[in-house]
Image (cartoon, rainbow, N blue to C red):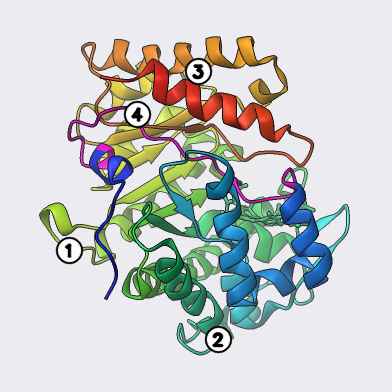
Amino acid sequence: MTSPLRNDRFLRALRREPVDCTPVWLMRQAGRYLPEYRATRARAGSFLGMAKNPEVACEVTLQPLARFDLDAAILFSDILTVPDAMGLGLYFVDGEGPKFQRPIRDAAAVAQLAVPDMETELGYVMDAVRLIRRELDGKVPLIGFSGSPWTLACYMVEGGGSKDYARIKAMALNAPQALHRLLEVVTDAVVAYLAAQRAAGAQALQVFDTWGGVLSPAMYREFSLPYLSRIARELERGEGAQRTPLILFGRGNGPYVAELAATGTEGVGVDWTIALEEAVRAGGGRVALQGNLDPTTLYGTPEAITTEVGKVLDSYAAGNGGSREGHVFNLGHGMSPDMNPDHVAVLVDAVHRLSRR
Ligand code: CP3
């Protein structure tokens, strides 16, 4: 048996119910900016070694919660576990980011792909979710996550990070059926992956469409949005207060908030390139909004951070008829390794203090 939740602000905000203050968590809240993370990583040997060991993944997930008054935990893992389990051979080169041994470059390679088994090939992720839930013991909810089909396909086709996405965009132009077939099988895998995390105990689910914003509007509506929409439609997540909320986050998704809200998702996460006020209006009262402080604000002084936090909170309320309900505070994207942990404490406390009802 797991304990009842002692802090449910985050889940209440996603249901757009009243809360005592605005909940906050930060993308990449467990990471290299924390000395205790660097110590665990040195002991574990590598990032993938950490992610594939449930005890270590659990330890690292809990590290930021021991320091800061965060309102949610996020599973320590990576979006690239899914293509790795599909046989692409994930590895990391220091300073160069993620790479695949066997990228997907043509229809023949796409045809070889299958949805991996969640409890065997990705069993280490589900074991980590179960262990983290047990260790959290109801302190805050646990967020599970996946990459979006488009973002995963970017890494699978490019074979790693990319400056211009030339290979996958060429595939979109020259072999659109092969790319759609790839996005279909990846979407099947993402739906199964999120469902398995939910069954293992994840209390909210976020999809990271990190690279949706590199597409033209026409291409976004052909290659990213329909697959996000399929996830929102097909992912079984319960009813009423028991429903496991889904958040669709994307870099550069500001122009598409109305369309994302229409997918049936409970939350939309936006980056800092759209005023939250406009995002709330575009959401039309159908979704909760998550975001959207520019992460580089953490390089500012404590005074500057506090001012900027206030602006984000007030921008949300301005778009929402003066009400702060339905807002989950976050950065517009992940934290960087050179950020100061003391500044994170300032940010978290400012969110709670300035939004106290
Ligand atoms: O938010 C969290 O705290 C949860 C953990 C998490 C990680 N990656 C840990 C991680 C999450 C949610 C991700 C998602 C992820 N991974 C995304 C989508 C979100 C985003 O940031 O846009 C993407 C694009 C990836 C792929 C990936 N994994 C990249 C580009 C990198 C950075 C490589 C580098 O050398 O900087 C990773 C590695 C990674 N994932 C780290 C962490 C903490 C750094 C690992 C390390 O070297 O210790």
Earlier-in-chain disc, 2 versus 3: 2
Image x and y of residue 6, in percent: 29, 50
Marks counted in the figure total 4
Crowding near pointer 4: few (<14 within 10 Å), some, many (20+)?
many
* Quadrant of the rendered image holding ligand 1: bottom right
Real-space Cα separation, disc 2 to disc 3, in angstroms? 41 Å
The amino acid on which the numbered mark 2 sits, given as a three-letter code, is Glu
Please give the residue where the numbered disc 3 appears in the rendered image. Answer: 309
Q: Which mark is residue 314?
A: none
Give percent across and percent down for residue 50: 70, 70
Q: Is residue 234 left or right of residue 133?
A: left
Q: Which residue is mark 2?
A: 121
Q: Residues within 10 Å of mark 3 (few under 14, many from 20)?
A: many
Are there few (<14), some (14-19), or many (20+) residues within 10 Å of tag 2? some
Q: Which residues are magenta?
A: 13-34
Q: Nearer the viewer, mark 4 or mark 1?
A: 4
- Helix, strand or loop at mark 4: loop
Disc 3 residue lies near ligand 1 with CB under 8 A: no
Residue beneath the point at 28% across and 55% down: 5
